[in-house]
Image: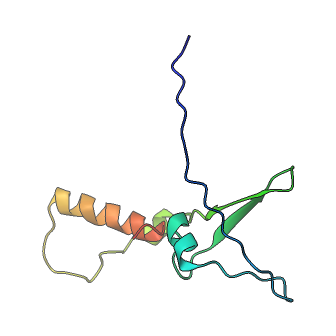
Amino acid sequence: MGNNVLLHYNKVMATLTVTSRGQVTFRKKVLDHLGIKAGQKIELDLLPDGRGMIRAAKRSGTIEDFIGRLAGKTKKVATIEEINDAAADGWAAVNGRK
């Protein structure tokens, strides 16, 4: 028999009011919990039982977004470690993690 893990989540419900235009406003605490920052998009998955699941939308980065990220920023020759760090930071920024 395998190991079963029971996870307990703090279930705090946020109640939103729908405006006459069909819009809702999320409180900052909710957006922070979801990892959503101003200007980012959200995804809402409509589930068959009438519920919805909301989360921060994943941004898709392309190599074109990355190329040239360092151009003109410095005259210094970078080490491979510095290049790797810059690449990681660039992809994090493109994917909304920075």
Residue under the point 71% across and 72% down: 15
Relative height, residue 15 to residue 51 (above, below): below
Where residue 46 sits in the image (x, y, percent)?
80, 58
Quarter where residue 21 is shown: bottom right
**Quadrant of the frame with the N terminus:** top right
Where residue 48 sits in the image (x, y, percent)?
86, 50
Where residue 6 sits in the image (x, y, percent)?
55, 33
Where residue 97 sits in the image (x, y, percent)?
43, 66
Relative height, residue 14 to residue 12 (above, below): below
Relative height, residue 22 to residue 77 (above, below): below
Residue under the point 47% across and 63% down: 63
Question: Can see residue 61?
Answer: no
Q: Which of 14/44 is in front?
A: 14
Residue under the point 33% across and 66% down: 89
Is residue 19 toward the left or the right of residue 25 in the image? right
Is residue 57 toward the left or the right of residue 95 in the image? right
Is residue 23 toward the left or the right of residue 3 in the image? right
Relative height, residue 81 to residue 72 (above, below): above
